[in-house]
Image (spheres, coloured by chain):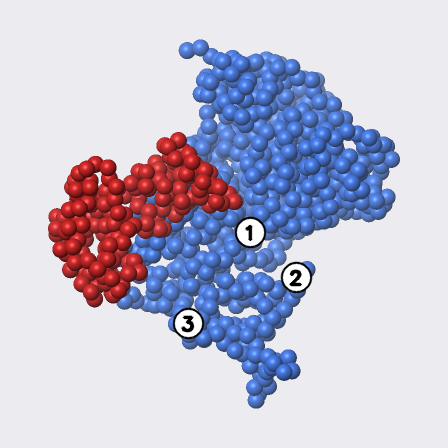
Chain colours: A blue, B red
Amino acid sequence: MTETITIIIDGQDYQVPRGMNLVDAAKMHGVDIPVFCHHPKLEPVGMCRMCLVELGSLAVNRETGQPERDENGQPVVRWFPKLQTACTQEASPGMAVRTDSAAVAQARYNVLEFLLTSHPLDCPICDKGGECPLQELTMAYGPGQSRFIYDDKMHLAKQIPLGDLICLDRERCIQCARCIRFCDEIVGDEVLAFHERGRRLQIITISDPPFDTKFSGNTTDICPVGALTTVDFRFGARPWELDEVASICPHCPVGCNISASTRLDRDFGGRKMIKRIMPRQNEAVNEIWICDKGRFGHHHSRSEERLTQPMIRRDEEWVPITWETAYREIAAQLARHGRESGFLAGASLSNEDLWELRKLARLTHADCSLGVWPATMGGIEQVTQVGVGVGTRLQDLGPDSAILVIASDLDEEAPIWWLQVKQAADRGAKVVAANGRATKLDQYATVALRYPYGEAVAALNSFAVIARRSNAIDEAFVAARAEGFAEFDASLKGARVPKPYAEAAQALLGAKDLVVFVGGEGVTLAQHGELMQAAANLLILTGHAGRANNGLIPVWPGANMQGALDMGFGPQATHDLIAQRPAMWIIAEADPVAEDARMAEVLVGAEFVALATQFMTPTAEKAHVLLPVQSFAEREGTFTNGLRRVQRFYMAQTPLEGTLPAWKVFAHISSSMPGGAKPRIAPGLVMRDITQHVLRYAEMSYPNLAHVEPQFPLVGGEDMYYGGTAYSNHGGLGVQWATNAEKEKYSLAVRPVDVARPRLDGLAVVPVRLLYDREPLFAPSSIMHQRVPAPYVELNVRDAEALGIAEGDAVMLTADDVQMAAEARVNSHAPAGTVLVPQRLGATPIPATLVECVVQKMEG
Amino acid sequence: MLAEKHAERIEKIFAKYPDKRSGVMALLYLAQEEYGWLSEEVLREVAELCDIDPTQVRSIAGFYTMYSEKPKGKFWLQVCTDLPCALRGADEFFSGLCAYLGLGERGGTTEDGLFTVEPVMCLAACDKAPMLQCNFHYHENLDLEKVKMLVEQWRAEAGQGDGAVG
């Protein structure tokens, strides 16, 4: 714990942490020191001079060592003769600060006059106008007039694309370097820099590609002027016209809190429309950042391609039907097929949708299988046991922490987690990045561990062997909580561990906190359960379970896979369904036909397939009834993120006419069934049902989820000059459910894992996930299309040479019954013997995980 | 390419620093010496050598005035016109030199590409003004007659073709 000391600000004593930045310390106690360049998430630079204050220290009598006092008994302060920048000062005992003196007011006035000498003052057409720190601080502290000669203003370029998403206006830039420092310090991509100096100083990039970090949009939030704007929102609306609606990003398991800025818009028929997506502060989730997929990936919610009419297939023609007819038809089919029905839920359904789907399934037959899609990752048992502790904040991981990321490319799968792990590494956390190939995390990792694909379980299990061998077992914790230790311990005894695994394991041992991210790359479903158990074994063995900042974080596919698992859906059920081939399917917000070559045939063989979907996907083409459901933006609901935090999103956009929220659709079908109850009228009531039936959701009532608490740093509103234009959180911080490790009454199971690796001869396919792909929820965001590559496969140089394939060749990949055409990329990135195949880039499904394949060059 | 032509010097430069990144300024000098000025292409070449982002290299080249991102004449004449030099007649000296070379009053590059003249901030030789620096070598206590002789001398050198300057 940092020591608390006393400093004097404007004659008042305040308790602040020793060494805290003075601007932040003052802000904590409600004292505003205006800033432009300083940002609480960045290192101080003292460039803008806006934070000048009078600084002094308490005079101490040299003989007695006691503070000197004047005749009134007040402490004597020795003031520095000149003003100091508060942002470059650390709070220390005896420090005295004056922020309200005439000298300070004059300094602020002068700095603003200087900054405005060449500012274009085009506020009436500036996107930032109305939420602009320069505007606000000028009104508060600055001059009403300029003494500067108007004709001497610098005229600079006003529309410079920094990459294809962010636009730079050089005239508005006040050279605070927040964007540069964000890229350098937080993201680690040094693609922005200053050029020239003095009055000619300006932001440049000549990087190739220019400014394409996945976090570029955040620079527009922390830019204190309108110099950086997004292509998406440029000239889109004025900030004061916008209504903010709290929401949750529907794209990945991080569950970033977002704010949808909406207004009634001509472009949307006068209805309420999302004009932009902004980050909403949740320091336990995304802090004040979001990735560009979240920021720019909202266009699907009002795409022209959306389905708005329930339809039934009659003689190979889609015929519009009413919702009532659709409900009755599906209810009748369910009654007819009974046990022969399968239910498949996508990872972007809300918890309420999932609950109503589950209720419908249970009403059909007690034994109906509840599958999830994609069915690539298992391990809900391990999450239930040792999921990361309640209260975990990844930003608190530091020098005492260790982080293991295994079988995942976090940068592509969960960018904000990547950002937080990278920053933890910067703060001194030990990071082991373990995967079958190099990922972007490697350059920040303490150890970048390469294992052959298929050997992930063995690699992770060997960490437990090393922990045992290094006496890093937490005996007390194991004795108190672990179950099955003796058998597990015996399995570790004498196991041989290759040196690289041992070195990686050593890097993690001995840390106070340990977080393990487990992904699913290059792992079969059966192996994934073992991989999760191996992670659980390690965490239990070393006592890193049951407290904040310790435990397991699964890198699920999709925004609400955790919720789907919590509601009783599972991946094994999906595989069982595919094997059983039920006569009837109800599929919700999933596109299995586009992702799995077997599924087209399975669904064609079915008698009746009902699909709840937003788009006419390949799966929709195999369905018999289509139910047009609403996107995340058009309704209320909750998602549960990978840290098991249940979070609410609210209705941001007027729903497309003819669409309904999925939960309501399922509830109506239920009510058309014998024994079905009347549908709930609001998702909050559905959640009330959930709280009564799903034990771990007992605390998840809507009022609880909407609870907010003050967070630091302050952002948005009055504080936008300080923390940026990210929105403060009024929609709710969400609630995490507690794992078994956090409840003393449960013991935690450890067991030997199956380390067998699949036998592979020849080339093996390894499906990988890319952030920017062509999944239905992302494809409609056309401004991102330049970042989505054409279908490609990555081959190792050696393999390519043997096959006579060169970079850029068109190739045909054949595996099982899959054939896919792609462009070959030849590099050392793909390990020898593997072909890396990104998912969802093309229209055809790619092969399932770790199967053998043949790659041939296509002629002509 | 620098890497082939000056492999030995580059190696020496890198040997001085704990990481390649630190060699960027020395390499920029080498590049400027080789190519005469730092085009974007050259900046990228240096970036690749130092294994840093080209944007960072351009930022450094832009900050320091001794790097030039525009083509310069073979003889790059920088005349100090700051106050102490101006008191000793540097302004007249500068405009006289420009007129002699047929350049406008703010300097520039001669049509034959031999000379670039530009005013600069303090070169720390106030007591020997008027002065100029030609390709980073000082020529002090000048007047218009002396500088005309120097110009002719440089012209003659250039005519001989070997381009040894300074």
Instruction: Determine contact: label 3, label 2, CB under 8 Å.
Output: no
Q: Is any atom of residue A716 visible in this view?
A: no
Judged by depth in the image, the label closer to the viewer, 1 or 3, is 3
Q: Is residue A302 above or below residue A703?
A: above
Q: Is residue A400 above or below residue A787?
A: below
Determine the CA span between mark 2 and mark 1: 24 Å
Q: Tag 1's secondary structure?
A: loop
What amino acid is at disc 1?
Answer: Gln
Badge 3: few (under 14), some or many (20 or more) residues near its Cα, within 10 Å? some
Q: Position of residue A380 (x, y in %)?
A: 72, 35
Residue at 21% in and 47% down: B116
Give the residue number, with chain letter if any, for mark 2. A2
Residue at 52% in and 45% down: B18
Instruction: Give the chain letter at badge 3.
Output: A
Relative to the observer, which residue lies in front, A409 or A438? Answer: A438
Judged by depth in the image, the label closer to the viewer, 2 or 1, is 2
Q: Tag 2's secondary structure?
A: loop
Give the residue number, with chain letter if any, for mark 3. A105
Marks 3 and 2 belong to one chain:
yes
Label annotation for residue A281: 1
